[in-house]
Image: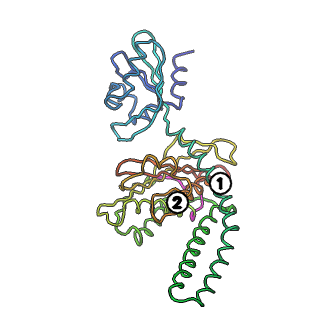
């Protein structure tokens, strides 16, 4: 095989590859590595490994072990922060010796991509469970509650003032449960929804105006948009509901008494994310990223794995259905929703497919 064809094959690989010399200098890199580290091949060749990985990274120790054993070694779930953009990633690292002069080849596989796939399957399973649960609740609970409320109203007419407080309590609690059931009915609605080209910036602007005129009037909004984004394939009303739920959660996390509350609405184009979605013959690209970040206290580690499950909430008056509804709607759009927790900067990201006309041309 010629050197030219070998280079073409290496550059065609979707995973970042680095060749590290005996003194830990970077000798070569493929195109995926340029994108991953946000540095051109020329700049990378002027760096040492310690310049692009965090201080004390286990990757340094991994390379030393490869040289000592003269055999391939791998390390899973390594935290890798980019010193340039301060973006943290979780990666699997594979290292193997190259020749006998101490050179080592490193390959990185971002764990967050695999985790997104796992979470997407989990969210879809939760959505299917909620669909059946919503239909059952509507039939088995809503109708009897109407009879209970009616009986309480009849009793209210023939009791004294002390007992009237109890009948009023029965009516109020029945109304509260009905409202909960009506929210659950949203999950059982399987009617087809019309979808088309949606401008995500129009959705974000609409939600921001709603929030600033009501529940988030005390919070500062920051917009970090990529104006060149193409439209997404979706239903505008449902996407408004998704972003509204995320913004409301962010505002509640910040709290009413915060004086420095901030919500960042962002959009970006992220190439390389593809998932298998129901009804599609192949994997679907999800390059449109919509982010909602807040500077609240953050999400606890024990809550994070169950964040999108129904009835999971830390709010005293919360139903725990807001994020479950978000997961259902995003999943129905063939997209992914994920939470990236960090102290004073919690980010929810929604990844969505691009709208394409029926003739295959982008719109």
Along the line of sight, which residue is nearer the eye, 357 or 174? 174
Quadrant including the C terminus: bottom right
Q: Which residues fall within the magenta stretch?
A: 228-237
Residue 357 x %, y %: 64, 54
At 56% from the left and 81% from the top, the residue drawn is 167
| Residue at 59 percent of width and 51 percent of height | 362
| Residue assigned mark 2 | 320
**Residue placed most toward the observer, 329 or 221:** 329
* Residue at 34 percent of width and 68 percent of height: 218
Q: Where 50 sits versus 203, above or below?
A: above
Q: Is residue 335 magenta?
A: no
Q: Where is residue 223 in the image (x, y as percent from the top left)?
A: 39, 58
Instruction: Give neighbour class at mark 1: few <14, some 14-19, many 20+ (Cα, 10 Å).
Output: some
Residue beneath label 1, please?
A: 129
**Quadrant the N terminus occupies:** top right
Q: Residue furthest left?
A: 259
Q: What element carries label 1?
A: helix
Q: In this view, does 358 lie above or below 178?
A: above
Which image quarter: residue 50?
top left
């Amino acid at each position: 095989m010629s050197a030219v064809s070998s280079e073409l094959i290496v550059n065609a690989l979707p995973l970042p590859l680095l060749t590290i010399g005996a003194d830990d200098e970077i000798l070569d890199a493929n195109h995926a590595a340029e994108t991953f580290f946000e540095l051109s091949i020329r700049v990378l060749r002027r760096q040492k490994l310690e310049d692009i990985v965090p201080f004390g990274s286990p990757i340094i120790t991994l390379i030393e072990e490869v040289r000592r054993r003269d055999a391939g070694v791998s390390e899973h779930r390594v935290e890798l922060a980019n010193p340039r953009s301060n973006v943290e990633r979780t990666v699997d690292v594979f290292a193997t010796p190259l020749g006998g002069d101490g050179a080592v080849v490193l390959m990185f596989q971002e764990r967050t991509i695999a985790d997104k796939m796992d979470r997407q399957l989990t969210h879809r399973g939760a959505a299917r469970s909620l669909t059946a649960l919503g239909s059952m609740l509507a039939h088995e609970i809503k109708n009897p509650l109407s009879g209970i409320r009616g009986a309480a109203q009849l009793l209210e007419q023939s009791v004294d003032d002390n007992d009237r407080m109890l009948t009023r309590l029965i009516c109020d609690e029945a109304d509260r449960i009905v409202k909960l059931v009506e929210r659950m009915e949203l999950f059982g609605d399987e009617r087809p929804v019309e979808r088309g080209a949606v401008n995500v910036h129009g959705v974000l602007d609409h939600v921001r105006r709603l929030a600033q005129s009501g529940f988030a009037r005390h919070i500062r909004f920051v917009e970090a948009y990529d104006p060149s984004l193409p439209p997404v394939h979706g239903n505008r009303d449902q996407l408004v509901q998704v972003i509204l739920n995320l913004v409301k959660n962010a505002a509640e996390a910040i709290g009413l008494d915060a004086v420095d509350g901030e919500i960042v609405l962002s959009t970006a184009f992220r190439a390389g994310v593809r998932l298998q979605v129901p009804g599609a013959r192949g994997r679907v690209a999800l390059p449109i990223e919509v982010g909602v970040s807040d500077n609240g206290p953050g999400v606890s580690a024990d809550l994070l794995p169950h964040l999108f499950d129904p009835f999971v909430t830390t709010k005293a008056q919360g139903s725990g259905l807001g994020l479950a509804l978000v997961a259902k709607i995003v999943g129905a759009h063939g997209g992914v929703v994920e939470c990236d927790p960090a102290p004073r900067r919690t980010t929810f990201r929604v990844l969505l497919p691009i709208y394409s006309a029926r003739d295959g041309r982008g719109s």
